[in-house]
Image (cartoon, rainbow, N blue to C red):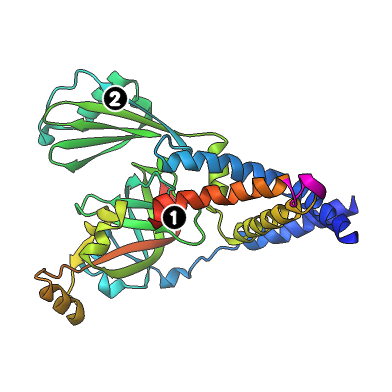
Amino acid sequence: MKWRKWNRWLHRKLGYLFFGMAIIYGASGIALNHHIARHWNPSMVERSEQVQGVTPVAREEVTKEYVMELLERTGEKDHYKQYYFPNDTSLMIYLDKGHITVNLQSGESRLLKIRNRKVFREMNFLHYNKPKQLWTYFADLFGLSMIILAITGIIMVRGKKGIGGQGAILLGIGIIVPLIFLLFYLWV
Amino acid sequence: MKKILTVAAIFAVFFGCNTENGQVNDTDVKKVNISTIEASASELEDQTVQVTGMVLHVCKHGGQKMFLTNDSTEASLLVRVGPRIPEFDVTLEGSNVEVTGKLVVSVVSNTEEAHDGEDHQAVASSEPADCPAEEALKAAGEGEECTTTITYHIEASSFKEII
């Protein structure tokens, strides 16, 4: 039938056109799944370490020299931005891509270094629709195309391997699994 | 070749439109400091303000908001990205920035605050508000005190790092 030819044509063209988008949304989708599950932060890498040998000091005694001496010890002198007191017992030293927090009462200090995670950051940037504006419409077009790809995909093959046979079983599983999760986690 | 050039031209128009900025006229912008906003947020509601401060914190879950402070106040000011800003980079923490944007004021009840996750810090930049009569009556009926507050933030249309 002629409609099958058009169906195949549409599926093929959209498949090629949105290959890149499917990879971006698929890979960043996995990343965001694990972000939400708190397994990791896909957009950035954080490294935290204890700073040893910081002696307790009163807020009034904290000077730029004190801060620079602490930075010298941690090897972060060249990354210094400025310091700030979140409260009377804490000192925050801001660095390029990180900071050091100091408990002025106990001397307990921690250095946190942050950097953007390459590739995933870019993919998440798009997946979260951070560019907004025209990207919104291109991403909408991709979403619509995914629906078309799904429909054209299930009706593409005839016979017992198609929607009239094995295909129907797989289709059913793909619909039932999310329904089971909704049933247990949302509806009950 | 002709097809490629046509596609390139379409993309050029596409992105030309995309980068159109929503810069407001300089004369419409009120230069204020964080203390001024803290003291008279209601009077500045919906106005375009420009404020400078040090970035205390950038939300790591998407970079859609950051908190500013300066030497003259202990309060922090919540800044959210506007429609033309993709995100605030976390490396802005500790930098001084100049932010221009609309001051948005909203009345938030204590129950709403409890549901707003990281936004609890925004409550620091808030002031008590008169409870609407209806809410006050409802709270009294339930034997509770109405604790509605006014919160405010800047919806940034532009920002730049000050060296």
Secondary structure category for the residue under label 1: strand
Q: Residue at x 35, y 67 (%)?
A: B103
* Label 2 CA crowd tier, 10 Å (few <14, some 14–19, many 20+): some
Is residue A13 toward the left or the right of residue B68 in the image? right
**Chain ID, mark 1:** B
Most common secondary structure along the magenta stretch:
loop
Q: Quadrant of residue A69?
A: top left
Residue type highlighted by circle 1 = Phe
* Cα gap from disc 2 to disc 1, whole angstroms: 29 Å
Instruction: Tell me what residue is drawn at x 84 percent, y 53 percent.
Output: A9
**Residue B3 can be seen, yes or no:** yes
Find numbered disc 2 in the image and state the secondary structure of the residue it sits on.
helix
For the C terminus of chain A, the quadrant is: bottom left
Which portion, as a residue range, is magenta?
A: A158-165
Q: Is residue B112 left or right of residue A128?
A: left
Toward the viewer: A6 or B71? A6
- What is the x, y in percent for residue B159? 44, 55
Q: Which mark is residue A71?
A: 2
